[in-house]
Amino acid sequence: MRAERLTDALAHHAEGPCWWPGWGGLRWVDMTAGDVLALHASGEVSRTHVGDVAAMIRPRSTGGAVIALERGLAFADEDWRVGPLPAMWTTDTVRMNEGGVAPDGSLYVGSMAYDQAKGAARLYRVHPGGEVETALESVTVSNGIDFSPDSTRAYYNDTPTGRIALFDFSPEDGLAHGRVLAEVDGHPDGLTVDGEGGVWTAIFGGSRVERWSPDGTRDAVVEVGARQVTACTFGGADLDELYITTSREGLDEGEDPAAGSLFVVRPGVRGKAVTPFAG
């Protein structure tokens, strides 16, 4: 199947799409521009600048959103006024990257070194009460994370490994018993899990999104008209549309004309509703 191009190439490094009815639909980030983008019913896209970096966005259960900035998090209220929280580290060589919310309402958000130094990053777990713990140490490019419909599994991409990792999940223990779900031909980036437990992962540099079944079998491929595919999420009133973000970071002018566009496809399966951060 092939995704339809939905917007112009309006982002430099689009990432982290998330559908939430309380926002009126889809939000995603133009990461290194520090902007949150919103898709309106008219097809228009608007921008809100939130900082030097906008790495991830998810809804909060109390309203508004939690946003990952360069070195920490921020809360945005329902009028999109942004209040940064204290920085989680001081070095300027590492920035936030992707994340997601676990079934218990805790936030998992990861980092990466600007030079992608091996093992320089971490995946953090932010509890609803504000406590922060390291969920995984010595990762390199912490990317997509999402959870199975029955809340017992977590799927995670550390991009340079070329693997989709699988963990057991419980609110008490967090991520445990890590193993490999699938070896990917390429660079696995952002991911999302559908209502049947299938894992959809963007393949950066591969012009596609792949679906992997819970038993580790690749059973669907979505072709995308831009090479640097960064992330995907289900949305629409029935959660039957897969929205796909792309990037033109590092590309020469005109090298990949659709890079930075938003794409969409109806893959024949529905997603599951996003869990809001309970903090």
Image (cartoon, helix red, strand yellow):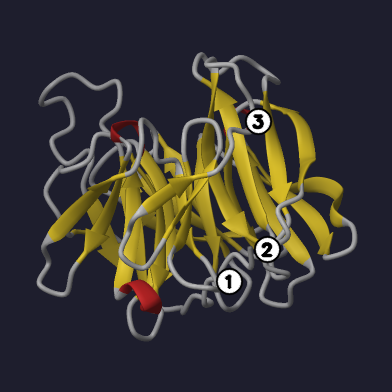
> Residue at label 1?
275
Q: Secondary structure at mark 3?
A: helix
Q: Which mark is residue 122?
A: none
In the image, residue 69 above or below residue 156: above
- At x 73% / y 77%, what residue is drawn? 150
Quick check: can you spot residue 188? yes
Residue 145 position, x and y percent, is 61, 52
Residue 106 position, x and y percent, is 69, 60
Q: Quadrant of the C terminus?
A: bottom right
Q: Earlier in the sequence, mark 1 or mark 3?
A: 3
Q: Amino acid at mark 3?
A: Thr
- At x 17% / y 41%, what residue is drawn? 258
Crowding at mark 2 (Cα within 10 Å: few <14, some 14-19, many 20+): many
Q: Secondary structure at mark 2?
A: loop
Q: Quadrant of the N terminus?
A: bottom left
- At x 40% / y 63%, what residue is drawn? 77
C-alpha separation, residue under disc 1 versus residue under disc 3: 27 Å
Q: Which mark is residue 161?
A: 3
Q: Is residue 251 left or right of residue 70?
A: left
Q: Secondary structure at mark 1?
A: loop
Crowding at mark 1 (Cα within 10 Å: few <14, some 14-19, many 20+): many
C-alpha separation, residue under disc 3 versus residue under disc 2: 23 Å
Residue lying furthest bottom in this view? 238
- The answer to whether marks 1 and 2 mark residues whose Cβ atoms lie closer than 8 Å is yes
Q: Amino acid at mark 1?
A: Thr
- The answer to whether marks 1 and 3 mark residues whose Cβ atoms lie closer than 8 Å is no
Residue 215 or 46: which is nearer the viewer? Answer: 46
- The answer to whether marks 3 and 2 mark residues whose Cβ atoms lie closer than 8 Å is no
Residue 47 position, x and y percent, is 21, 50
> Residue at label 2?
102
Q: Is residue 234 left or right of residue 189?
A: left
